[in-house]
Amino acid sequence: MNERVLVTGSYGQIGTELTLKLRSLYGDTNVIATDISPAPETLEVSGPCRYLDVTDPRQVTALTVENKITRIYHLAAILSGNGELNPQKCWDVNMNGLYNILETARTWKVKQVITPSSIAAFGPDTPKENTPIDTILRPTTMYGITKVAGELLNEYYKQKYGLDARSLRFPGIVSHEAEPGGGTTDYAVDMYVKAVAGETYSCFVTGETTLPFLYMPDALNALLQLSAADDSKLVHRTFNVTGFSASAADIADAVNRRIPGFSCSFEPDFRQIIAESWPRSIDDGDARNEWGWKPAFDLEKMSDDMIARLRDKK
Ligand SMILES: NC(=O)c1ccc[n+]([C@@H]2O[C@H](COP(=O)([O-])OP(=O)(O)OC[C@H]3O[C@@H](n4cnc5c(N)ncnc54)[C@H](O)[C@@H]3O)[C@@H](O)[C@H]2O)c1
């Protein structure tokens, strides 16, 4: 049977690149890009783009049925920084959106649903180093609360209805194609963008703040590899994945070594507390064991690539 893939939140940081990758895998016309904001040109010219508000169950069902969808990558969400500015909206989009997707998938026999979770599922009581999958999950942000509840909802649909729902806890994603969408790790992207533009940067966390990160090519591979993984080998339904850990000062230094004269100051705002509630490093051993996860990029390799790609775009 022909695969028909629905991507929600397609025009965000991850969706913009994931949709193109899925189109090269499944065929341009078989991947329906959806969002509530205007489509970027790259997606509009390469395949179908539709308006879809995931908080409206009728829209989710109609689009799924009309397009005979077999797989869903559910990326529509309000991220951590924006979620703290509007917690009610964060709950509505992240929880009701996921519920509508899972209910539609269950009812219309969609084969698989992949949903990113986040290191925001962890909280200040979670062990900070080499954090495993199964640990204390007591987040203090609305975003984190929706991610923990979302992971559990995915698992519920698997055990109750047999729906093949899978999830990945992403760390901060660094990329050069689409702008990041209001998360707590956006500063990592901003540093490269500002440096290549010849501008200074004021970072909104302290230099010592250390978090796990993943470069976009690795993040896309993680989503596709998890989707393709043999179900019988999966012990978990939610996985930790990470590329490397770095402090904000480490990243500024990596940029500075490549673009001498780049000046970065550190002026923490409300996102400092969010960053401090998350782990500094992540144990992704279960993803490695259960579906062969292995990232390709560390901080140095990523910095070379980010700067080269951003210079190409100028
Ligand atoms: N980017 C990261 O660093 C990161 C880290 C961890 C987890 N994640 C997760 O990955 C997923 C994708 O993240 P992203 O970085 O691409 O986010 P993003 O903010 O860049 O994109 C999200 C998209 O969702 C859309 N959206 C918002 N409300 C919607 C609604 N009601 N209906 C349909 N679309 C709606 C937005 O217009 C936006 O294009 C999210 O689940 C996020 O929590 C991202």
Image (cartoon, rainbow, N blue to C red):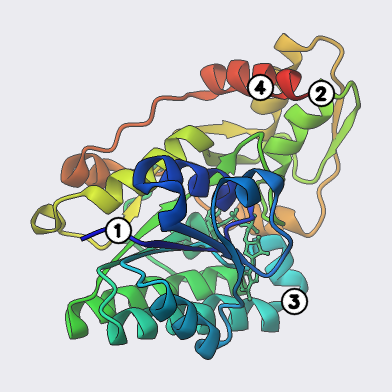
Residue to which mark 1 is pinned = 3
Residue to which mark 4 is pinned = 309
Q: Residue at x 42, y 71 (%)?
A: 67
Do labels 3 and 2 touch, CB within 8 Å?
no
- Asked if residue 54 is positioned above or below residue 2 in the image, the reply reads below
Q: Report the Cα–Cα distance between label 4 and label 1.
A: 32 Å
Q: Report the Cα–Cα distance between label 3 and label 1.
A: 36 Å
Ligand 1 location (quadrant): bottom right
Q: Quadrant of the C terminus?
A: top right
- Going by the numbered disc 4, the residue's amino acid type is Arg
Q: Is residue 86 left or right of residue 294?
A: right
- Going by the numbered disc 2, the residue's amino acid type is Ala
User: How far across and down, in percent of the image, does residue 42 sit?
Assistant: 64, 43
Residue to which mark 2 is pinned = 195
Q: Circle 2 sits in a helix, a strand or a loop, which is it?
A: helix
Which residue, as the protein is rendered here, is positioned at the far right? 199
Is residue 149 in sight in this rendering? no
- Asked if residue 174 is positioned above or below residue 234 in the image, the reply reads above
User: In front: mark 2 or mark 4?
Assistant: 4
Give the mark nearer the N terminus: 1 vs 2. Answer: 1
